[in-house]
């Protein structure tokens, strides 16, 4: 296989998805220069991420992270190539990189029992031949040894692409389109929902609302990208925002570490 791969690389050398330059043997998907230009969110370094706060008051999400911002050309090329251009290996590689980073820097995966990719409709699967969220979830599962379950929920209705709709129409477009088909597998579990990009959060909210109906379920979210204009939020705000069972709260505290710990433990 190594010889065959070398021959293929010689005849058709792998190229950077963003700039099309030839990749070196140590590079994959993106060249080093383009990887450096990818705007990472570093949400995992915040007490509560902006993508988590988007869902406060709607669902008791425990934690939510995103790898990079969906704002520059490189990010868009990665997401669109993974979703529409038959390049699931892009999603896999990015999921692999992100999971490795999270494992090295945080305890994000501690306590998570199951990884569930956001499903797509049968019609869209027939056209695309794969679910763009699956390779991301598969890579995270292999890096963490957390079981991947793509069989516990289904998308039972075909919907218009979310990108073609205004913000107000996105939520109604995905209402009631997901169904839990194996509730016994979810009972009492901490489930990590995985998707390629969070924009308004409507798709993830619709899916999470169904999963949350199962007794004892806890929910967290991982996406590759977050579409937001708020880039690089402050990690040292004067006020630390937190939520209790999904209800947003605000409390003024000093920079004293003991008070920060006390707030985190009050959830």
Image (cartoon, grey):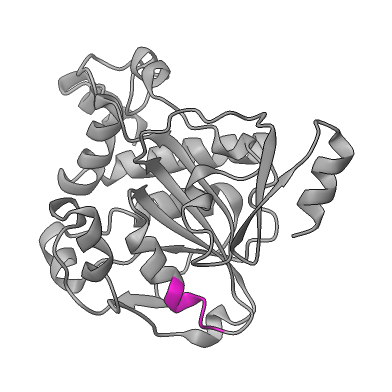
Residue drawn at (16%, 55%) of the image = 165
The image shows a total of numbered marks equal to 0
Q: Tell me where residue 109 appears, x and y as whole percent.
A: 64, 52
Q: Tell me where residue 257 appears, x and y as whole percent.
A: 85, 35
Horizontal relation, residue 184 to residue 208: left or right = right
Q: Tell me where residue 73 appears, x and y as whole percent.
A: 24, 26
Horizontal relation, residue 228 to residue 55: left or right = left
Residue drawn at (53%, 31%) of the image = 233
Q: Residue 15 is drawn in which quadrant?
A: top left
> Which residue is more in the foreground, 127 or 172?
172
- Residue 150 in sight in this render: no
Name above or below for residue 18 compared with residue 52: above
Residue drawn at (24%, 23%) of the image = 18
Residue drawn at (34%, 37%) of the image = 1
**In the rendered view of the protein, which quadrant contains the C terminus?**
bottom right
- Magenta residues, start to end: 209-214
**Residue 6 on the magenta segment:** no
Name above or below for residue 146 compared with residue 262: below
Q: Tell me where residue 251 appears, x and y as whole percent.
A: 72, 47
> Which residue is more in the foreground, 220 or 171?
171
- Residue 239 in sight in this render: yes
């Amino acid at each position: 296989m190594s010889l065959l791969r070398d021959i293929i690389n010689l005849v058709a050398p792998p190229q950077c998805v963003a700039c099309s330059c030839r990749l070196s043997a140590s590079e994959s998907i993106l060249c080093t220069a383009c990887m450096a230009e990818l705007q990472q969110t570093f949400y995992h370094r915040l007490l509560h991420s902006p993508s988590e706060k988007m869902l406060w008051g709607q669902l008791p999400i425990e934690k939510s992270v995103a790898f990079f911002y969906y704002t520059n050309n490189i990010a868009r090329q990665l997401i669109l190539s993974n979703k529409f251009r038959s390049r699931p290996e892009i999603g896999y590689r990015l999921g692999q990189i992100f999971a490795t980073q999270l494992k090295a820097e945080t305890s994000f995966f501690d306590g998570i029992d199951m990884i569930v990719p956001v499903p797509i409709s049968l019609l869209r699967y027939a056209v695309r031949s794969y679910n763009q969220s699956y390779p991301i979830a598969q890579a995270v599962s292999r890096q963490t040894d957390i079981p991947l379950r793509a069989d516990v929920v289904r998308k039972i209705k075909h919907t218009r692409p979310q990108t073609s709709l205004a913000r107000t129409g996105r939520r109604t477009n995905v209402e009631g389109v997901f169904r839990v088909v194996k509730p016994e597998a979810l009972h009492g579990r901490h489930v990590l929902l995985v998707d390629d990009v969070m924009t308004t959060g409507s798709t993830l909210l619709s899916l999470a609302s169904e999963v949350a109906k199962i007794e004892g379920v806890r929910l967290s979210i991982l996406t590759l990208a977050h579409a937001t204009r708020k880039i690089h939020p402050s990690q040292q705000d004067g006020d630390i925002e937190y939520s209790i069972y999904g209800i947003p709260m605000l409390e003024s505290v000093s920079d004293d570490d003991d008070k920060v710990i006390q707030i985190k433990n009050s959830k």
